[in-house]
Image (spheres, grey):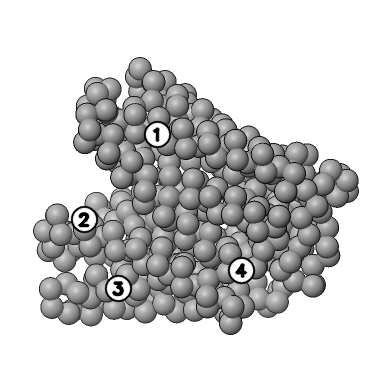
Amino acid sequence: MASLLLAVIYVAFISLGLPDALLGAAWPTMSQDLAVPVSWAGGISAVISMFTIVSALLSDRMTLKFGAGRVTAVSVALTAAALAGFSVAPNYWILLLIAVPYGLGAGGVDAALNNYVAVHYESRHMSWLHCMWGVGASIGPYIMGFALSNGQGWPWGYRYIAILQVVLTVILVMSLPLWKSRKHTVSEERASASDDSSSRAERKPLGVAGVLAIRGAKEILIMFFCYCAIETTAGLWASSYMVLHGGVDKITAASWASLFYVGITVGRGLSGFITMKLSDPAMIRLGQVLVLAGIVVMFVPLPHHLGIVIGLVVVGLGCAPIYPCVIHSTPTYFGEENSQAIVGVQMACAYMGSLLMPPVFGIIAQYITIALYPWYLLLFLVLMTVMHESLRKIRG
């Protein structure tokens, strides 16, 4: 039964990634059909991110009240409804309105699933599950491309993903009994407890103030913010950096930039095996060293701009273990009773880093120089590393 639940969670992570790249893939067509400027995609993305943050901050309260299984099922259902709503939206303003439940659903399932896996499963599963998210995020644009290339239009691209999310919702509802009384398997140091109503009733929501009052919480939250600033800035501005600073042609740069995400996805697949030998803190340090190595390689003047390309791939490989291992280490550092609240705030910090820091670099690139791209990544890497070592001293 435990294996069956794990299989359901793997499917859920693939499905979680499916919608993430849809807007970017569909927007060139959507903007024309809706007669709005291309730049307005940022408004939809911002609304989704803001309500994802809200949902993540509420995840502790919701999970304590309803349980991780129910929160996940309802969140996926909410996402499915929002995707279906996108497919019939008559104008941009309706899309903005539908982006609210879209964000609420995304944040709820993200926080609930990540903490559940951190508490109940080994670190290798966390890495492989986030690898599956990457698979889903890669498949989503292909589904949208299929709809567009067959003359069905972007609404059917959203409908296809909505249908898959409805199927997942049914699977999650049917699997609810499996979520109850699921004993911990990751460490004898953690107290064994179940996900039933009696165990949840013994705990009370911490809230943001309660989380910040815990020693070491600020450090791990800043780590998460920095990590997501690195990942999203690296991915968003890689192509522009290659074109404007490296002199690479636009088509080639677009193809090479995708190698960063290939590095993350492949790296998370490999990380699952390496975690069988190394602890979460060691994996995080390994990732930080690889990110540093990738940034350094970007400065090496290799022929045909290979330094930039190889550097991006290595940065992606370095990013791979950090996100899942930080989440997985949270219950160990802070205890299961605090982990859901902290993971929820971590998710909020992650989305804030993703929402705020790439645009900040955009301003730097426009008004100073895009050549500061690797230095910008290095700044957040140094801060993340300092926070990790501080956390180890406080809670290690």
**Which residue is denoted by mark 3 in the rendering?**
311
299 sits left or right of 129 in the view: left
Q: Amino acid at mark 3?
A: Gly
Is label 4 in contact with label 3 (beta carbons under 8 Å)? no
* Residue depth check, mark 2 versus mark 4: number of the one nearer the observer: 4
Q: Is residue 258 visible?
A: yes
Q: Amino acid at mark 2?
A: Ala
Q: CA distance from mark 2 to mark 4?
A: 33 Å
**Which residue is denoted by mark 1 in the rendering?**
160
**Which residue is denoted by mark 4 in the rendering?**
123
Q: Is residue 108 visible?
A: no
Label 2, residues with CA under 10 Å away: few <14, some 14-19, many ≥20: some
* Residue 312 picture location, percent across and down: 31, 68
Q: Secondary structure at mark 4?
A: helix
Q: Earlier in the sequence, mark 2 or mark 1?
A: 1
Height in image: 276 above or below 20?
A: below
User: Which residue shows up at 28% across the image and 22% down it?
Assistant: 34
Quarter of the rendering occupied by the C terminus: bottom right
Q: Secondary structure at mark 2?
A: helix
Tag on residue 254? 2
* Residue depth check, mark 1 versus mark 4: number of the one nearer the observer: 1
Q: Amino acid at mark 1?
A: Tyr
